[in-house]
């Protein structure tokens, strides 16, 4: 009886000890965008890298398809996500309390690192003869579902072009994963997608039976947008990526950068570990999606406006990327 008691006691001690060593894993969900975008596979690639070492790191990453940048900021701030992909323009607006967050700065928003550039991409059915933003008047235009970055960019563009979204056209709020087929099915005339190039969803959109073209944003409009908003930059969509598209020349527009954000509430060691893992495997990341091919350790520190999360900052200093 005594022996059994001693045995049970020592088992209990062993169990407690083990419990300590195997502290509860840290769960990190990364919010992305629609399944046909670039955010979703990128979030998947980062999760896969980190999960490979889950025994060592005790971090479990999962990727979630979401509404996009605006949704991700809000979900980070209310604790539903630990990481999220956010357009650089929306990172800026959220932290400063502008636009969607007018008067409500999201003070806990933190930048981790930047990823690929994104172009505000306007696609239109060639049979609708849409050659400029002004030609969208009277048309059925998907400006993007609420929560997406493209909805904000399309709204900015229309304001700059002096077009009233409510009166001058029929605006739709369709998810990016459905827009391409709706354009092919003649249910919309055009749609906006702020996205990295090249990408599969636009390849599909321009390769259907209905001829599709990219609509350029006129230089004057781009200049005005860049002048008014520090986070916009001129950008070009190379048509060579898109067999079947009606354009013969590269398309000028404006763009932003995709960035990875988190909240000040996420522990330093978690963000440090994830940042380090990504930067040490940047070669892998570059080959995982063609839109990520341009990534360098240096450009992954550009386009961030919210304060750096201390975990990311620690890694960047250690790696000599930051003084
Ligand atoms: N830029 C888009 C957004 O913020 C998402 C693009 C993507 O999923 O690749 O909503």
Image (cartoon, grey):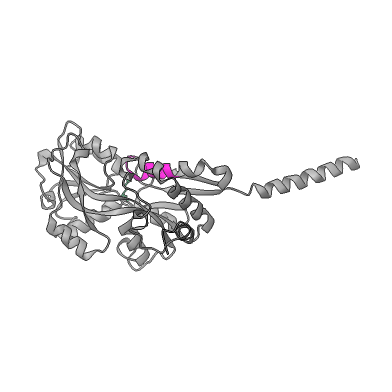
Taking the image as shown, residue 102 lies to the left or right of residue 316, namely left
223 left or right, relative to 178: left
- Is residue 169 visible to us here? yes
106 sits left or right of 230 in the view: right
Q: In the depicted view, which residue is nearer to us: 186 or 129?
A: 129
Say which quarter of the image contains residue 186. top left
Query: Which residues are drawn in magenta?
Result: 36-46
Residue 290 is situated, as x and y percent measured from the top left of the image, at 31, 40
Give me the residue at 20% from left, 61% from top. 225
Residue at image coords 35%, 67%: 96
State whether residue 178 is above or below residue 149.
Answer: above
Occupied quadrant, residue 182: top left
* Location of the N terminus (image quadrant): top right
Residue at horizontal 77%, vertical 47%? 13
Q: Is the magenta stretch mostly helix, strand or loop?
A: helix
x 32%, y 57%: residue: 88
Please say whether residue 267 is visible from this viewpoint: no
């Amino acid at each position: 009886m005594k022996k059994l008691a001693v045995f049970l006691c020592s088992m209990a001690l062993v169990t407690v000890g083990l419990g300590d060593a195997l502290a509860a894993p840290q769960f990190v969900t990364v919010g992305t965008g629609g399944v046909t975008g670039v955010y979703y596979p990128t979030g998947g690639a980062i999760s896969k890298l980190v999960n490979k070492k889950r025994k060592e790191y005790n971090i479990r990453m999962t990727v979630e398809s979401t509404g996009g940048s605006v949704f991700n900021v809000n979900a980070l701030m209310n604790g539903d996500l630990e990481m999220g992909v956010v357009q650089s323009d929306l990172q800026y607006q959220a932290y400063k309390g502008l636009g969607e967050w007018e008067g409500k700065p999201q003070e806990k928003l933190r930048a981790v690192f930047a990823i690929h550039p994104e172009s505000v991409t306007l696609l239109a059915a060639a049979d609708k003869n849409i050659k400029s933003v002004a030609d969208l008047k009277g048309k059925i235009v998907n400006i993007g579902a609420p929560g997406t970055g493209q909805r904000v960019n399309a709204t900015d563009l229309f304001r700059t072009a002096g077009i009233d979204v409510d009166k001058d056209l029929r605006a739709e709020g369709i998810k990016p994963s459905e827009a391409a087929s709706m354009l092919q099915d003649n249910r919309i005339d055009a749609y906006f997608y702020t996205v990295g190039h090249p990408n599969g969803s636009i390849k599909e959109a321009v390769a259907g039976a209905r001829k599709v073209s990219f609509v350029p944003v006129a230089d004057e409009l781009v200049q005005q947008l860049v002048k008014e908003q520090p986070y916009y930059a001129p950008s070009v969509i190379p048509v060579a990526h898109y067999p079947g598209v009606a354009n013969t020349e590269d398309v000028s527009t404006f763009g932003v950068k995709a960035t990875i954000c988190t909240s000040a509430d996420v522990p330093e060691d978690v963000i440090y570990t994830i940042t380090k893992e990504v930067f040490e495997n940047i070669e892998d990341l570059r080959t995982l999606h063609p839109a990520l091919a341009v990534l360098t350790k240096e450009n992954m520190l550009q386009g961030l406006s919210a304060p750096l999360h201390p975990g990311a900052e620690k890694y960047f200093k250690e790696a000599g990327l930051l003084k």
